[in-house]
Image: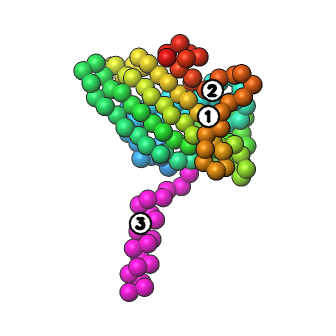
Amino acid sequence: MRKLLFQLVLLLAALGAGPAGAAEEELSGPRLRGLQLALEDFHKHPPVQWAFKNIQLLSASDLEFSAGTFVKLQFRLQQTSCPKREWRNSDCKLKPNGRKRICQACFKFDSKDQVLKRMVHCPMDSPNGRKVTQGRGGGAVGNPQAEGLG
């Protein structure tokens, strides 16, 4: 009985929890493109100095409509030891106590897969799981009002 229970626990762990960054492998089509564009947008933001890696995909959905596709993503990022220009480098190691961000991203693609609208918002994630508001008067990454989308 214990052996069966142990095998079941191993199976559930294998199905539910993958390694950091595995979220990209689980996505396809417009969801994957949305995640890639969100990471690119995040790393273009001037205050960001270090590369961040996607450590957890919290949710992903897409909705087909007559003019294209709407994609909504929520994911968690963690700071790495690499400078931001190397954010695509898969060898970048996570900083054990690096900053974490929880991101919301929405993209509207036309039928030819061109981006019509985008919004990427990645406030800092505090240790207790609450979002931390940005300081120093600099708005958050991808703030729709700051980009004229809101």
Q: How far apart in space, not on screen, are marks 1 and 2 (Cα)? A: 6 Å
First-in-chain label (1 vs 2): 1
The front one of 30 and 66 is: 66
| Lateral position of residue 32 relative to residue 112, left or right | right
First-in-chain label (2 vs 3): 3
Tell me where residue 18 appears, x and y as whole percent. 49, 56
Which residue occupies 51% across, 34% down?
A: 104
Residue type indicated by callout 3: Leu
Q: How far apart in space, not on screen, are marks 2 and 3 (Cα)? A: 37 Å
Q: Residues within 10 Å of mark 3 (few under 14, many from 20)?
A: few
Residue type indicated by callout 2: Ala
| Lateral position of residue 49 relative to residue 71, left or right | right
Q: Residues within 10 Å of mark 2 (few under 14, many from 20)?
A: some
Residue indicated by mark 1: 123
Which residue occupies 44% across, 63% down?
A: 14
Residue type indicated by callout 1: Pro
Q: Is residue 104 visible?
A: yes
